[in-house]
């Protein structure tokens, strides 16, 4: 009954304004109409501001650019070991050089967005990086036999590029059920002594999903 009464009062105001517009023409009527129009525009402007503020709070863009420097670890330079059961060994590399990089990343973040009865958050990003003297462990010799064990060593790859995309989405329902989905696709390429090849230590794609 209160909602009906409120609607009838608003309806009556509209009828009065319609009547003033139809029979008015004096200064008082013009002032009332202008005041109503100004108030209406202010209300619409406030609604647009509220919608923009809500969208800004829920969605955001980000971008990062960085230069990196990575020194070899002491174990990569000095340590080695032998596995006689599987016929391989790792040897140190005292000539290992520091690794330098230039990377960039950009994407979109989302949070507290309602859909399908749940609150959702997540992000999507694209990234790329260029590395000089990339530190990578590779097989340098051997066939994994007792007389010719496989030999692994950390070396510097002259130039490496890594690029890809990744995304994550999380949903939470009021009943305590949660959903997580994450995926990535990455490509890595290397060039050493003028020879180009894929970077095998980079996973080309990954997909993870789970309920909680």
Image: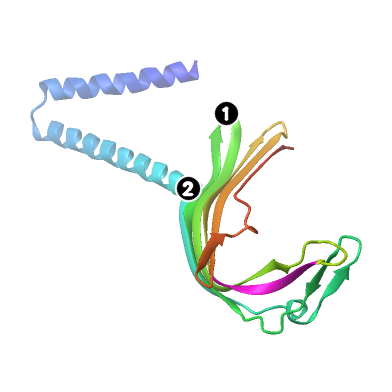
Query: Quarter-wise, where is residue 7 in the image?
Result: top left
> What percent of the width, then of the height, locates residue 60?
47, 52
Relative height, residue 49 to residue 80 (above, below): above
State the residue position of label 2.
59
Q: Which residue is mark 1?
A: 116
Predominant secondary structure, magenta span: strand
Q: How is the image coloured?
A: rainbow
Could you tell me which secondary element the residue under label 1 belongs to?
Answer: loop
Q: Is residue 149 above or below residue 202?
A: below
Q: Is residue 123 left or right of residue 50?
A: right
Please state, as top left, top right, bottom left or bottom right, where the C terminus lies in the image.
top right
Q: In the rendered image, is residue 43 in sight?
A: yes
Q: Measured from the top left, where is residue 199 in percent x and y?
A: 59, 60
* Residue 189 in view (yes/no): no
- Residue interval drawn in magenta: 150-158
Q: Earlier in the sequence, mark 1 or mark 2?
A: 2
Residue found farthest to the right: 85
Task: Give the percent coordinates (x, y) of residue 25.
Answer: 8, 28
From what the image shows, is residue 175 above or below residue 110?
Answer: above
> Which residue is pictured at 49% across the width and 19% down the height?
2
Answer left or right for 22 relative to 71: left
**Cα distance, mark 1 to mark 2?**
18 Å
Who is closer to the viewer here, 158 or 4? Answer: 158
Residue 28: where, in percent of width, then height?
14, 34
The residue closer to the viewer here, 142 or 71, is 142
At a point 31% along the width and 38% down the height, the residue shown is 44
Residue 41 falls in image quadrant: top left
Q: Secondary structure at mark 2?
A: strand
- Graded by Cα atoms within 10 Å as few (under 14), some (14 to 19) or many (20 or more), the crowding at tag 2 reads some
Q: Is residue 123 left or right of residue 4?
A: right
Q: Tell me if residue 70 is in the magenta stretch.
A: no
């Amino acid at each position: 009954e209160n909602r009906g009464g409120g609607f009838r009062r608003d309806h009556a105001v509209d009828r009065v304004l319609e009547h003033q517009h139809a029979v008015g023409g004096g200064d008082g009527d013009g002032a009332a109409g202008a005041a109503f129009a100004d108030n209406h525009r202010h209300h619409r402007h406030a609604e647009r501001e509220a919608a923009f503020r809500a969208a800004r709070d829920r969605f955001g863009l980000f971008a990062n650019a960085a230069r990196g420097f990575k020194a070899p670890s002491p174990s990569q330079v000095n340590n080695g070991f032998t596995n006689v059961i599987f016929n391989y060994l790792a040897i140190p590399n005292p000539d290992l050089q520091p690794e330098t990089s230039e990377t960039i990343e950009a994407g979109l973040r989302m949070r507290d967005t309602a859909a399908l009865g749940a609150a959702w958050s997540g992000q999507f990003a694209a990234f790329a990086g260029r590395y000089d003297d990339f530190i990578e462990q590779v097989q340098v010799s051997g066939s994994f036999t007792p007389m010719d064990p496989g030999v692994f060593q950390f070396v510097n790859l002259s130039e490496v590029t890594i690029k890809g995309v990744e995304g994550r989405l999380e949903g939470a329902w009021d009943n305590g059920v949660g959903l997580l989905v994450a995926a990535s696709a990455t490509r890595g390429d290397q060039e050493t002594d003028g020879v180009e090849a894929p970077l095998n230590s980079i996973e080309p794609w990954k997909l993870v999903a789970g309920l909680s």
